[in-house]
Image: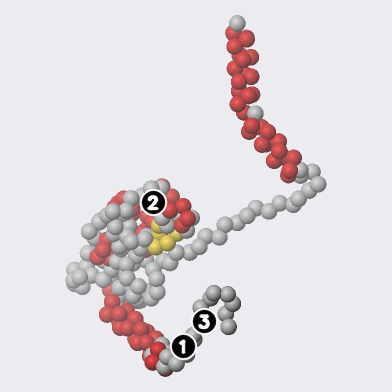
């Protein structure tokens, strides 16, 4: 029996649990179906990359995530201009364009411009008319050896930062150094005031 004024337990165990069990017997078949769908998609996209368009590398929003990089929606018009790729020509060769995004830093702009140039240098563009190929289109021998890119195009790689190590010696007084620098920071104002007073006395 429960203590004090608590409710008397009335457990309900006869609920026909067999009707409420969630099974997942179709998981292996779905895996095969997804794989077949990916293969069909790649086959229909040939010779274009199976993963789709090239995306830029951008930083996450807010202070919590802005230290991490991820794939963006598309390249800015400024990035395309720096890379020498016309805005309307870019989507036709598998480059995603986002006219709303703005470049907030020179480093991000240069990284994405370099990404575009690397992609453009390795790209084999099939000619619309084989008998009259344009200057930027591939030659016949390059078309024969061209292969389809499988997987993500130029995936985001995590940059591993290195830490400079040094040997600790008995001469290193870390605590005393911290106290000294804290005192120097605290004395910036009084020292500047003292210099001003001394300069004023000299002028008199």
Q: Foreground: 178 or 69?
A: 178
Q: Mark 3 points at which residue?
A: 8
CA–CA distance in space, label 1 to label 2? 64 Å
On the image, the x and y values in percent for residue 87 come to 25, 56
- Occupied quadrant, residue 160: bottom right
Q: Nearer the viewer, mark 2 or mark 3?
A: 3
Q: Nearer the viewer, residue 121 or 156?
A: 156
Above or below, comparing residue 180 to residue 104 in the picture: above
Q: How far apart are marks 1 and 3 (CA)?
A: 13 Å
Residue beneath label 1, please? Answer: 12
Q: Quadrant of the N terminus?
A: bottom right
For mark 2, what is the residue?
Answer: 109
- Residue 106 in the image, given as x and y percentages of width and height: 41, 47
Q: Do the residues labelled 1 and 3 touch (CB within 8 Å)?
A: no
> Between 198 and 108, which is closer to the camera in this rendering?
198
Q: Residue furthest front?
A: 5
Give the answer, above or below, for where 9 lies relative to 166.
below
Task: Give percent across and percent down for residue 21.
Answer: 42, 89
Q: Do the residues labelled 1 and 2 touch (CB within 8 Å)?
A: no
Q: Looking at the image, which residue is at 32% across and 60% down?
A: 74
| Front residue of this view, candidates 187 and 53 | 187
């Amino acid at each position: 029996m429960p203590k004090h004024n608590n409710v008397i337990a009335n457990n309900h165990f006869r609920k026909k649990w067999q009707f409420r069990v969630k099974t997942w017997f179709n998981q292996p078949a779905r895996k095969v179906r997804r794989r077949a769908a990916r293969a069909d998609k790649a086959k229909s996209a040939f010779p274009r990359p199976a993963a789709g368009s090239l995306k830029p590398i951008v930083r996450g929003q807010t202070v919590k995530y802005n230290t991490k990089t991820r794939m963006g929606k598309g390249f800015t018009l400024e990035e395309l201009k720096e890379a020498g790729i016309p805005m309307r020509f870019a989507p036709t060769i598998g480059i995603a364009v986002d006219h709303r995004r703005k470049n907030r830093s020179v480093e991000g702009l240069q990284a994405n411009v370099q990404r575009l140039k690397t992609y453009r240098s390795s790209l084999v563009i099939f000619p619309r008319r084989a008998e009259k190929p344009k200057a930027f289109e591939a030659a016949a021998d390059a078309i024969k050896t061209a292969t389809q890119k499988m997987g993500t195009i130029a995936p985001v790689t995590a940059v591993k930062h290195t830490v400079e190590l040094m040997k600790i010696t008995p001469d290193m007084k870390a605590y005393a150094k911290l106290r000294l620098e804290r005192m120097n920071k605290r004395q910036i104002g009084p020292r500047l005031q003292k210099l001003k007073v001394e300069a004023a006395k000299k002028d008199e």
